[in-house]
Image: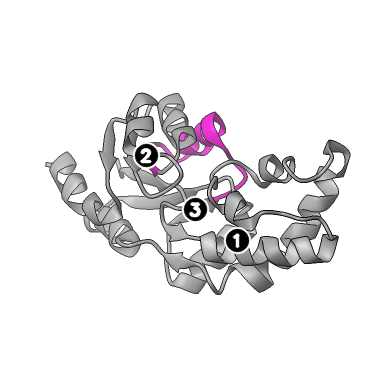
Amino acid sequence: MTLTVGFDLDMTLIDSRPGIKAAFQAFSAETGVPIDADLAVSRLGPPLHHELAHWFPEAEIEERVVQYRALYPTYAIGPSLAMPGARDAIQAVRDAGGRAIVVTAKNGPHAELHLSHLGIDPDAVIGGLWAEGKAEALREYRAGVYVGDHTGDVRGAATAGAVSVAVATGPCDERELRAAGADVVLPDLTEFRPWWEAYQA
């Protein structure tokens, strides 16, 4: 059976902080609502609805999601960067005959724009899933490993019965990731290939 490895997107495969900061600044200017973009990008991981709830009344959230997402491609894609080791991590899975998928809370079309812009080409991209909800896609694709940077990613892996590989490149540090139950914690994706090759041995 082909082994499937799932990867989170924001702060796992890509550093989207510069792009999301620019998008929030443009969004703030358009709405006239002061938004601390630096604070917003310090807690990436949960769905957009969660972040907007800090800045807008609940009754406005759905409308504001649509408004923000309309701005997103213009401001967020270009400035965002691949995380160190991201491309090699995908390639390491393929070198072993496996397939790599992306499972993210970000909406699918924007996730695909990021990956295409950066030349990262996973076998599938599944958006709109967060924390335990990620298990839905991980089970569907029979992923045996899930790599993420947030305690929510650790919970998603556990719910799916997958090995949780956490990278300490996002808002959660090594201690938090281990406390959440991560099976493996790496400093970043540059350490993924050595771990993966040992795991396959």
User: In the image, which is nearer the foreground, mark 3 or mark 2?
Assistant: 2
Q: Earlier in the sequence, mark 3 or mark 2?
A: 3
3 or 1: tag closer to the N-terminus: 3
Tell me residue 20's x, y (percent). Answer: 60, 61
Can you say which quadrant of the picture contains the N terminus?
top left
Left or right of 89? Residue 74 is right
The amino acid marked with disc number 1 is Ile
Q: Are marks 3 and 1 in contact (CB under 8 Å)?
A: yes
Percent position (x, y) of residue 99?
A: 35, 52
Residue stretch in magenta: 126-148
Residue wearing tag 3 = 10
The image quadrant that residue 19 belongs to is bottom right
Q: Given the image, on which type of amino acid does mark 3 rest?
A: Asp
Residue under the point 23% across and 58% down: 95
N-term-proximal mark, 2 vs 1: 1
Numbered mark located on residue 20 in the image:
1
Q: Secondary structure at mark 3?
A: loop
Question: Which mark identifies residue 173?
Answer: 2
Q: What distance separates the C-alpha of mark 3 from that of mark 1?
A: 10 Å
Q: Is residue 68 left or right of residue 57?
A: left
Secondary structure at numbered mark 1: helix
The percent position of residue 83, horizontal first and vertical second, equals 38, 61
Near mark 2 (Cα within 10 A), the count class, few <14, some 14-19 or many ≥20, is: some
Q: Amino acid at mark 2?
A: Asp
Label 3 – label 2 distance at C-alpha: 15 Å
